[in-house]
Image (cartoon, coloured by chain):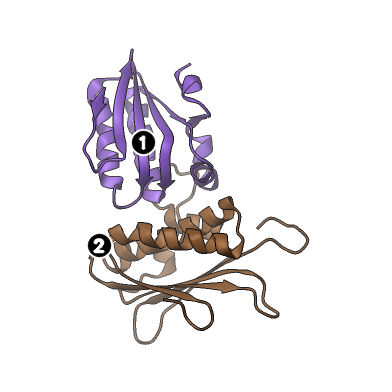
Chain colours: A brown, B purple
Amino acid sequence: MTERDGAIRISIRSNPEHLPVVRGAVEQLCRVIGFGDECGAMAVSAVDEALANIITHAYDGAGDRPIEVTLRPLGGEDERAGLEVEVADEGRVVEAEAIHGRDLNDVRPGGLGTHIMGCCMDVVEYTHPAAGGTRLRMVKYLADADGAPE
Amino acid sequence: MNRQAADSPVAEVVQTGETLIARVVGDVDMRRSTAFQQSLMDLFDRSPRRIVLDLSEAGYVDSSGLAGMVKLLSRGREDDVELRLCCPNAAIRHMLEITRLDGVFVVCPTLDEALA
């Protein structure tokens, strides 16, 4: 569904089968915004890892809980162009420190999702609404006007 | 040649000498990572000396897919089995880079180089 401010809201359940649908939407919107393939892939990875974290940690693997994904192109007046993503869940609050990425020199399975999100996006912010759950806001900006990398 | 379970991203395993070539097809995300890991661990039942993961037909790989590869690497080190990745797309290469796994795995641009 497209909102008045150009945002696209996607409501899914915490079912891993829905992940490719969201990945596809993010990928296509990144193309519309003007991201190159590599930067678009980074945004796709960040959103996918965020959803996987929610399913695994906030909902403990339950496949029927709500997740709201809002994709908002940025670039209005006095606004730097890019993509803002909000992911909201109603699950157990997991403090960011509890799911922080592992030391990359410690080569072992797991612990990479949060690190990938941080590497792929310019802004990663968690808030916990009074009503419960977690709201994750991530932003990826387009290249600077002087041509700096996206 | 051996075809794998339908839900596993490891679509096919080809044996050439003491090397197993596991062809990874499609996305490796949390939907398929358990089957992926199982398929990779099953490779050791054939007692290979080298395993090549052919990623030329792999699409998206998430952190759970990378975890499966790290488990394969760890088991390979225990069993003295060499592991090589080949033909990853740009997105997979980038995932390996930002997780610094590009310095842990042997990554070859072509299958021929992986088999050399």
Query: In which quarter of the view is residue A93 placed?
Result: bottom left
Query: In which quarter of the view is residue A17 placed?
Result: bottom left
Disc 1 marks a residue whose amino acid type is: Val
Residue shown at 47% from the left, 33% from the top: B105
Q: In the rendered image, which residue does mark 1 sit on? A: B24
Nearer-the-camera pick, A41 or A94: A41
Residue shown at 36% from the left, 38% from the top: B25
**Dot 2: within a 10 Å radius of its alpha carbon, few (fewer than 14), some, or many (20 or more) residues?**
some
Taking B107 as reference, is A33 left or right?
A: right
Q: In the rendered image, which residue does mark 2 sit on? A: A61
Nearer-the-camera pick, B78 or B63: B63
The reply to whether residue B67 is visible in this rendering is no
Figure quadrant of the N terminus of chain A: bottom left
Taking B103 as reference, is B79 left or right?
A: left
| Protein chain holding label 1 | B
Disc 2 marks a residue whose amino acid type is: Gly
Nearer-the-camera pick, B99 or B25: B25
On the image, the x and y values in percent for residue A29 come to 51, 64
Figure quadrant of the C terminus of chain A: bottom right
On the image, the x and y values in percent for residue A74 come to 60, 73
Please, which residue is most extreme toward the bottom here?
A: A130
Q: Are marks 1 and 2 on the same chain?
A: no
| Distance Cα–Cα, label 1 vs label 2 | 25 Å
